[in-house]
Amino acid sequence: MCAFLVDVLCMFSRGNNVQYVRRDRISFMGVPMNFQLAPTEDIGLQHVLENGLALIRGQSFESARRRQVLTNLIEIFTEAAEGSRALQPRNLIFAVEQRSAFVRFSVFYRYLSKRFGDEVPNRIRDTLEVLTAIRNGSGDNDLRRASAEALIKNLLDSLGTEKALTPLIAPATFQY
């Protein structure tokens, strides 16, 4: 729905003529508009990760919220695990074919590679398995749960660190 709204915003009318403007050329008061949030600005991602961390640690949630959090987390980690296929040999056009999965994996790799190195794809898959086991109600061993907890906590910490270190945008000046 958001992509549709953005596309509609990109169209404007001149008389009977409707023209399309590229998204990267739209600006508001001279400032180019960005239609994609940076990971540090994506509050929804951070909240889902925080709730997922609480679930892994055993905090109780009402069933509807628990189901929603697990569904969102599993979707995010499935996409990241799918994006890790870009690292496999003979997969040159994967990033073009599966852009959203590749972008999700790139974000995860960016924030987790310092701590986990080349094990990031395996750790993502392991975390996905733990989340799936939690959703299915099957007990998973404590070592795998601790590993999933460490991965999500490290991801949240990295997002928080980058957010704290990102310079603020200069305020716009208005002349009346």
Image (cartoon, rainbow, N blue to C red):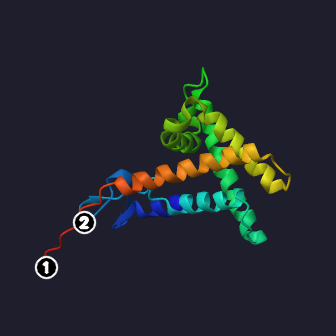
Which secondary structure, mark 2?
loop
Contact between marks 2 and 1 (CB within 8 A): the answer is no
Q: Which residue lies furthest to the right in this view?
A: 138
Q: How crowded is mark 2: few (under 14 residues within 10 Å), some or many (20 or more)?
A: few
Identify the residue shown where x is 65% and y is 38%. Answer: 123
User: Which three-letter amino acid code belongs to the residue tagged 2?
Assistant: Met
Image side of residue 52 versus residue 166, left or right: right
- Which is more toward the observer, 35 or 111? 111
Residue 47, percent across and down? Answer: 57, 63
Q: Quadrant of residue 164?
A: bottom left
Which secondary structure, mark 1?
loop
Identify the residue shown where x is 52% and y is 62%. Answer: 2
Above/below status of 2 relative to 126: below
Q: Determine which of the numbered discs, if any, sits on residue 110 in the image.
A: none
The image quadrant where one finds the C terminus is bottom left
The image quadrant where one finds the N terminus is bottom right
Above/below status of 8 relative to 78: below
Regarding residue 62, the answer to whether it shows in the image is: yes
In the picture of the structure, the residue carrying the numbered disc 1 is: 176
Q: Determine which of the numbered discs, if any, sits on residue 29 in the image.
A: 2
Identify the residue shown where x is 79% and y is 54%. Answer: 134
- Which is more toward the observer, 8 or 68? 68
Above/below status of 122 relative to 129: above
Residue 124, percent across and down? Answer: 65, 41
Regarding residue 1, the answer to whether it shows in the image is: no
**Separation of residues labelled 2 and 1 (CA atoms):** 14 Å
Residue 65, percent across and down? Answer: 71, 69
User: Which three-letter amino acid code belongs to the residue tagged 1?
Assistant: Tyr
Q: Which residue lies furthest to the top in this view?
A: 90
Image side of residue 51 versus residue 7, left or right: right
Q: Residues within 10 Å of mark 1 (few under 14, many from 20)?
A: few
